């Protein structure tokens, strides 16, 4: 197909040729004919379809916001002669990446690397990969797509934080409760057998006495729980960058707890985002889920705290919000006594409006965080406070 330059040359050549013959100007007709000949040669140049093999992969497939990621394309000339005038075009989100290719010798693979944009958090569609062959004058081009589209997941940036102490000494032998996590450390109660229970926990004396299969319920009471509330309301943040900073702070705190195999309950005013139990891959799951979090248009953040009024008790509650509207954040006062420790982070570069936290029983710390570096310094201070 002709490029924009090719179409312009063809139209101009036709006009010059017609005018030259009509008005008797041989030079104009000759110039017009030359233009038309150049367009015809360019079309013939790009007409043969080159036999090429192309594979593209993304490395790495998941990165933190602002971290480097590359598209790696391996091109192979499967024809019998050297191919010239090739370019690779790849789409990454709204951006188009075009890279020139040196002459490809027959049977020789060529690896091409190019940077992918990672400035914006979220899933970034990449591809499909397109090979473009053009003539030396750029009058005609031939496009061919290779492979399917892929996805680069841009996750929040994180900094490595210490786990915030909950303020209560957790120990193996208690106290236990019905809301404690199922585990293997501490005996809590006897209950009826359900499908999937470990038969090694069957209590035979109670089974014989009740004529029902009874098992020991074992719990882990030494695991500190971290509850994170991320305020995603648009009006809570002055800028998009402030919201991204809040997501980065939330990701850093959640990852610190998950890395220590502690349970994490992550929620917002729109509902539960993710609940983890302390397994080995929780940190990656939390980062993947936070990569997809969007801003909401709700007016109040109070809904995020409704379910916490019946919280199991204990652990740390961290509320991450912006420096803007504070409507609904006073609900922290309703649930303050359900937790051992409560902290509210205010993420953003502007002055923070103070929410009404009356009824909380004690002052809730509200550190103002303007960058991840400030989060690291402030969090270490909060951890020893």
Image (tube, grey):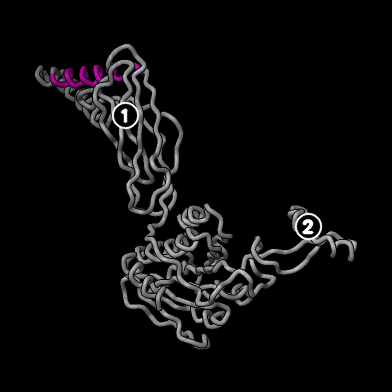
Residue at (44, 61) in percent of width and height: 251
Q: Which residue is mark 1?
A: 111
Magenta region, residue range: 31-50
Residue at (23, 30) in percent of width and height: 5
Q: In the displayed structure, does residue 111 sit left or right of residue 307?
A: left
**Magenta stretch containing residue 126, yes or no?**
no
Magenta: main secondary structure equals helix
Helix, strand or loop status at disc 2: loop
Please identify the residue farthest to the top as the structure is shown. Answer: 80
CB contact under 8 Å: marks 2 and 1: no
Q: Is residue 215 above or below residue 281?
A: below
Q: Is residue 307 above or below residue 10?
A: below
Residue 303 x/y as whole percent: 56, 73
Quadrant housing the C terminus: bottom left
Helix, strand or loop status at disc 1: strand
Q: Which residue is mark 2?
A: 194
């Amino acid at each position: 197909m002709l490029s924009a330059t090719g179409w312009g040359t063809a139209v101009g050549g036709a006009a010059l040729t017609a005018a030259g013959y009509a008005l008797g100007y041989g030079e104009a007709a000759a110039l017009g004919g030359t233009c038309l000949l150049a367009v015809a040669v360019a079309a013939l140049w790009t007409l043969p379809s080159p036999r090429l093999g192309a594979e593209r992969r993304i490395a790495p497939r998941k990165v933190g916001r602002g971290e480097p990621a590359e598209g790696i394309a391996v091109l192979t000339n499967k024809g019998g002669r050297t191919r010239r005038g090739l370019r690779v075009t790849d789409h990454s989100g709204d951006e188009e990446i075009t890279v020139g290719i040196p002459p490809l010798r027959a049977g020789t693979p060529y690896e091409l690397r190019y940077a992918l944009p990672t400035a914006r958090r979220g899933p970034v569609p990449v591809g499909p990969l397109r090979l473009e062959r053009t003539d030396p004058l750029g009058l005609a081009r031939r496009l061919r797509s290779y492979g399917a589209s892929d996805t680069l997941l841009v996750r929040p940036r994180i900094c490595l934080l210490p786990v915030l102490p909950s303020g209560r000494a957790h120990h193996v032998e208690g106290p236990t409760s019905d809301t404690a996590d199922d585990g293997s450390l501490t005996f809590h109660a006897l209950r009826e057998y359900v499908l999937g229970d470990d038969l090694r926990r069957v209590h035979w004396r109670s089974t014989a006495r009740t004529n029902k299969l009874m098992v020991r319920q074992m719990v882990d009471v030494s695991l500190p729980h971290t509850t994170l509330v991320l305020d995603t309301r648009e009006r809570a943040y002055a800028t998009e960058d402030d919201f991204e900073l809040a997501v980065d702070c939330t990701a850093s705190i959640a990852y610190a707890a998950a890395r220590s195999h502690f349970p994490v309950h992550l929620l917002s005013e729109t509902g539960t985002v993710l609940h983890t139990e302390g397994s080995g891959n929780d940190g990656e799951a939390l980062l993947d889920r936070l990569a997809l979090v969007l801003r909401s248009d709700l007016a109040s953040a109070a809904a995020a705290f409704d379910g916490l009024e019946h919280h199991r008790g204990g652990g740390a509650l961290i509320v991450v919000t912006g420096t803007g509207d504070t409507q609904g954040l006073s609900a922290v006062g309703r649930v303050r006594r359900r937790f051992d420790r409560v902290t509210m982070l205010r993420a953003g570069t502007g002055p923070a409006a103070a929410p009404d936290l009356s009824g909380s029983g004690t002052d809730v710390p509200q550190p103002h965080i303007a960058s991840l570096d400030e989060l690291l310094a402030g969090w270490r201070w909060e951890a020893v406070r």
